[in-house]
Amino acid sequence: MRFEFDQKNWINIMDGEKDCYLLTNGLGGYSSLSVTGAAARGDQALLMSAKRAPNVRMHLVSNIFEKLVIDGQEYVLTSQRMRSGEDYEGFRYLQKFVYDDFDKEAPVWTFRAGGVTIRKHLLMVHGKNTVALWYELDNPSEKDVALELTPLLRFTSKKEDFDVAQQLEEYKIAPCGEKTAEDRQYCITGRDLQLYLAANAPLSEETAHLFGEMYFSQDERDGRVAYGNAFVNGTLKKDAALKEGLYVLFSTEEMAFTDVKTYYEDLVQQNSARKNQLLTQAELDSDLGKQLVLSADAYVVRRDSTDGKSIIAGYPFFEDWGRDTMISLAGATLVTGRFEECKSILRTFVKYVKNGLLPNLFPEGGENPMYNSADAPLLFVNAVYEYMEYSGDKAFQDEILPVLEQIIDGYQNGTDFHIGMDSDSLVMAGAGLEQLTWMDVRVGDFLPTPRHGKPVEINAYWYSALMVMYTMTKDVKYQELASKVKESFQEKFWNENAQCLKDVLSGGKDENQIRCNQIWALTMPFTMLPADREALVLKKVKDELYTTVGLRTLAKDDPDFHRIYIGPMQERDRAYHQGTVWAFPLGAYYRACIRYAGKCGDMAEKKRIQTELAEGFGALTAWLREGCVSQIAEIYDGEAPTVSRGCFAQAWSVTELLRAVYDYEKMQEEILSDGKNIRD
């Protein structure tokens, strides 16, 4: 899809900081700046590399300070707010920003100053910590033009603030490899790190000095550190031959090329071919579906510690977590036809199963995994089933069944974190300050949403996992236990007064709160509710929790409802699951609607559902434009979602909505094949 921004989107420097782009490399590394090319967060960078995939990341290149010189007059193209108040306002020359994933290059900035047009193209190389830029010149009056580019470097870990007291003299530049009069490569070293810079222009070394403290408005909004610095130790300059374009590449490894232009063009072709391959194997027809396929690719990453694949939870803050991976898996790999990668991810988690539990957080640097997740293991069982259904790989059952049996045994007989089956066959979990469901935030010694007891979604996962085991093994003990779970679930979770499902069986006030967790009781491979109650749950969710970008985590009339998510961390954490809109449950809601439409005999109801779905998917295009272009964010304000909050790009937000679009397209195909288009 093509997302185009122009000068009405950056009337002032603040407006230009609201939206950003994201490019990723399949290693956990990324490139992300605002649509005007500014850094509005400390975690935004032109090159955030992955030293050890996917979580050990290094902030190498913050940005490039860009100066265009026309007939001796200087035009600064860089946009950046500064702590000093002396801001760089290159957005005044920025005519257009275009992000088009279906094109060979994305994004592209178009600047115009002094009768000269400069188009800046950017790409990130998959599988490498490499970004490549091409500055394309249009100079119809053949003015005397030079372009000066000064890399703003950081050389810190992603989570580390730039220390202005560190010894800048340790950063050195040295030529490396063969070079011609135009095409050159340099190695910049410091703090045991290396950055290679290749360009068809010379790099003039200068004494390393600080650029100046940049102001990060989006971090200040969220109560994070609002300022950060970078250092400068060299400038690229191209003038006489600028009409041929200026090519600049940054990488953590030495680049082998005959000339920089050809090397860049080869990278563009490889990038385009890879995108086309992803779209071909996914087989989605709509532009929305195709865009979400490419958007979802950002989260499938390599994990060096297991020599396999994983799914990163979100950019720019999160790592790869067990729960998020299991929720994101089907959308990221199954509906996109990436079956081998799906199997690799499942095998990655198998290596760490312990006491029937999966890691919620993987170890790095010799640390132990964290297993505080009551949902990830059950989601894993269901994900295995879905993998075999989508891929047809029935042979995988022999390899994986012992692990599934270990998980079921842990839940049936009890395991860590007070997770275990009660006498009514329902699963209970949690005590004290344990955080075990996705509503897992903790503020000091306070859990805003403890959900200790029997959470509704955990028991929906539990029933489906038991039916998966029965389907695989034909062992009636699983079927018999599933029947008991179903009987207890239908009896104890139904809230007759509210005409929906209770959120958690706890005996407290939270038991009857109207929350979005009940939607997963309608979307698992095997479900328990009769159709009439499914319809009531869908109505309650639509009436109380639905927005076009996600579901509220709590009904607006609840005394615990928080209308906005903003401010210091403790304030934000108290709002996190108390009404804040999350995008990923919306995908489950849409899939539940599609399922219900498939079994509903009322033609008028089918039409209503199809119309609602069409309108909902239509609204997603606007949300894909907001915040991080082509991505869906983690969360939005509960009362009136207008701008993205939290992670600006979230795996399960994108992948669950992709899964819903996939199901919708399949539903449309079935309607057409039956000759019964319900719009008629």
Image: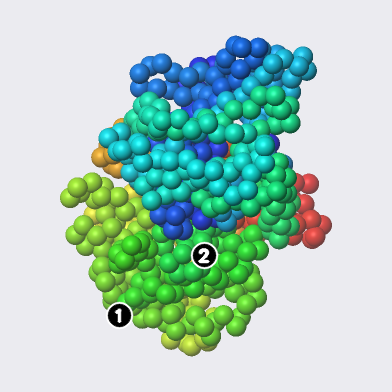
Q: Say which of 4 and 93 sits in front.
A: 93
Q: Say which of 208 and 125 sits in front.
A: 208
Quadrant position of residue 93: top right
What distance separates the C-alpha of mark 1 from that of mark 2? 31 Å
Quadrant position of residue 183: top right
Viewer can see residue 264: yes
Q: Say which of 118 and 107 sits in front.
A: 118
Under mark 2, the amino acid is Lys
The location of residue 162, given as percent across then percent down, is 34, 38
Residue at image coords 41%, 30%: 207
Under mark 1, the amino acid is Asn
In the image, 402: left or right of 617? left
Q: Are marks 1 and 2 in contact (CB under 8 Å)?
A: no
| For marks 1 and 2 on the same chain, the one whose residue lies earlier in the sequence | 2
The location of residue 400, given as percent across then percent down, is 49, 80
Which mark is drawn over residue 570?
Answer: none
| Vertical position of residue 265 compared to residue 140: above or below | below
Residue at image coords 47%, 63%: 303
Residue at image coords 66%, 33%: 246
How many badges with numbers are in the image?
2
Q: Which residue is mark 1?
A: 413
Residue at image coords 23%, 54%: 508
Quadrant position of residue 570: top left
* Residue density around tag 1, few if under 14, some if 14–19, many if 20 or more, within 10 Å: few
